[in-house]
């Protein structure tokens, strides 16, 4: 830590912010803030055909919504390190690639896709599963190059890996890691169309932006020796790497888009009414534990407690129940004013409630504050009450056809009709008087009214149902 900590999150704009990306960004953010450093958001947009319009803005704004706020970004550049998009630096990559060629550390490769495929098949036939380029173009004469050019071939540029060199580094998550260069073939650093490959562009970017630490997913572990070779050739200081483990589903399988029970993208969580603070908290625990095993953290508390040595070296399980519990805890802890501000857009989705004044909506919303796990739940719960059921199940029908129901329903209706003020006490008094007069109690007393009003046997307190529907609607349904 002898120089200012600088970390980065560098997504491709080929999609929107998903769970894995958000977690990577979060741990980089926590690392930077823990050590008074900078968190940088930059874009790796060289896969032009796969880029999606709006994806860059969506990723950045979803991060900001989560509270993972970059110190530098495409929208807040530092002139010293700009630009923050790779497509705006293509000439720079070409210049550095050419330097490597001039120093003898890289070379032009004219092999076609068909020829490379033949090499792979030949190596496979000899039992070699991991393809290594055979260096056919390493020592081409000028005459041979001109022949290829005359055929219309455009060269790629390959990095020449050193032979039998061990690349060792201390991984922030995994400890000491080493790779032998002989296991890695000469890889392409510049494509024939002048676009840099990931392993080359990321080194140039990290060097020029003075990135000191790189926290990323374990799928990048095998890229590290390739990148270290580039750092070595340029005599640049490499950042310290840390490779976080994969996220798995409850079955222990790597999280994928086929896991339909798990939402993949931040925008989905946002739309369903998850609080950003709750997701931030959940992501903190997705691969990291505090010294005291706490479950609930504010952002400030997470920054203070964060210790990279406590990042898990084992896969992290995505637990939906834990996420829902954390989100419901945050909802319960909101002030009534903040809660109403959060829940209002969801209540307005319920047609029955659209004409209610703000005070009525506020009172209705508070009924559900301790019941809901996500904002969308209030829509489901309210619709269960206000939308009349067309058909009833056998058990519900049986209860309504019972002798006690034939007594309770008209009695309740008559007493409600004569009640001027509807509140919790007056509704309790009606049930109590029916119980006293008719000797009916428990399920036989309450259930016929609940089913008549909502068509269901379970739900919120009866008074709250009556309060939401209003006296006229209740009388009509009875």
Image (cartoon, rainbow, N blue to C red):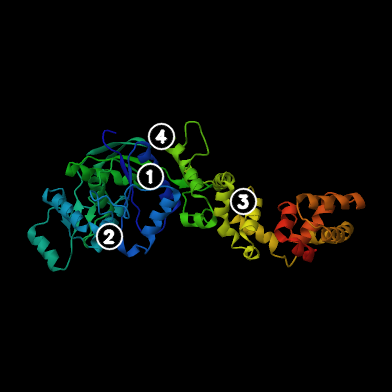
| Distance between mark 1 and mark 2 Cα atoms | 28 Å
Q: Quadrant of residue 376?
A: bottom right
Q: Residues within 10 Å of mark 4 (few under 14, many from 20)?
A: some
Image disc number at residue 474 = none
Q: How many marks?
A: 4
* Percent position of residue 204, x then y: 23, 49
Q: CB atoms at circles 2 and 3 under 8 Å apart?
A: no
- Is there any visible trace of residue 266 in the rendered image? yes
Q: Earlier in the sequence, mark 1 or mark 2?
A: 2
Q: Residues within 10 Å of mark 3 (few under 14, many from 20)?
A: many
| Distance between mark 4 and mark 2 Cα atoms | 46 Å
Q: Nearer the viewer, mark 4 or mark 1?
A: 4
Q: Which residue is mark 4?
A: 307
Q: Which residue is mark 3?
A: 372
Q: Earlier in the sequence, mark 3 or mark 1?
A: 1
| Distance between mark 4 and mark 3 Cα atoms | 33 Å
Give the SS element for disc 4.
loop
Q: Nearer the viewer, mark 3 or mark 1?
A: 3
Q: Nearer the viewer, residue 86 or 435?
A: 435
Give the SS element for disc 3.
loop
Q: Quadrant of residue 162?
A: top left
* Percent position of residue 54, x then y: 38, 62
Residue 180's place in the image compared with 371, above or below, is above
Look at the image and tell me in which quarter the N terminus lies.
top left
Give the SS element for disc 2.
helix
Q: Which residue is mark 1?
A: 218
Look at the image and tell me in which quarter the C terminus lies.
bottom right
């Amino acid at each position: 830590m002898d120089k200012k900590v600088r970390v980065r999150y560098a997504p491709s704009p080929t999609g929107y912010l998903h769970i894995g990306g958000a977690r990577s960004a979060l741990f980089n953010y926590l690392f930077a803030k823990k050590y008074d450093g900078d968190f940088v958001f930059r874009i790796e947009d060289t896969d032009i055909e796969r880029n999606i319009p709006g994806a860059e803005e969506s990723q950045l704004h979803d991060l900001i919504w989560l509270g993972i706020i970059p110190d530098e970004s495409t929208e807040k550049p530092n002139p010293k390190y700009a630009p923050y998009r790779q497509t705006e630096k293509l000439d720079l990559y070409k210049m550095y690639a050419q330097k490597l060629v001039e120093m003898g550390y890289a070379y032009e490769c004219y092999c076609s896709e068909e020829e490379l495929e033949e090499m792979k098949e030949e190596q496979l036939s000899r039992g070699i599963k991991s393809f290594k380029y055979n260096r056919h173009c390493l020592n081409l004469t000028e005459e041979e190059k001109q022949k290829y050019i005359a055929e219309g071939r455009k060269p790629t540029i390959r990095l020449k890996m050193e032979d039998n060199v061990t690349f060792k580094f201390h991984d922030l998550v995994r400890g000491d890691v080493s790779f032998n260069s002989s296991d890695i073939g000469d890889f392409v650093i510049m494509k024939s169309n002048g676009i840099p490959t990931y392993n080359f562009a990321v080194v140039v970017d990290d060097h020029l932006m003075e990135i000191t630490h790189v926290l990323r997913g374990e799928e990048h572990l095998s890229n590290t020796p390739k990148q270290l070779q580039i750092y070595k050739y340029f005599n640049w200081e490499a950042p310290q790497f840390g490779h976080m483990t994969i996220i798995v589903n409850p079955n222990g399988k790597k999280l994928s888009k086929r896991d339909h029970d798990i939402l993949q993208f931040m925008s989905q969580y946002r739309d369903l009414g998850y609080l950003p603070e709750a997701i931030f908290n959940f992501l903190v625990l997705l691969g990291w534990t505090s010294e005291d095993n706490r479950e609930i953290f504010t952002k400030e508390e997470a920054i203070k407690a964060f210790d990279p040595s406590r990042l898990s070296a084992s896969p992290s399980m995505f637990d939906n129940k834990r996420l829902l519990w954390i989100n419901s805890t945050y909802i319960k802890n909101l002030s009534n004013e903040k809660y109403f501000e959060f829940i209002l857009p969801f209540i307005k989705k319920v047609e029955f409630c659209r004409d209610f004044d703000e005070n009525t909506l506020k009172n209705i919303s508070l009924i559900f504050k301790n019941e809901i796990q996500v904002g969308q739940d209030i829509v489901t719960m309210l619709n269960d009450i206000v939308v009349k059921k067309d058909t009833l199940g056998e058990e519900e029908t049986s209860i309504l056809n019972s002798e006690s129901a034939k007594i309770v329903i008209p009695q309740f209706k008559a007493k409600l009709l004569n009640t001027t003020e509807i509140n919790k006490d007056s509704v309790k008094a009606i049930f109590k008087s029916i119980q006293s007069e008719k000797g009916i109690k428990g399920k036989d007393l309450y259930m016929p009214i609940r089913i008549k009003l909502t068509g269901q046997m379970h739900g919120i307190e009866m008074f709250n149902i009556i309060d939401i529907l209003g006296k006229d609607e209740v009388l009509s349904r009875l």
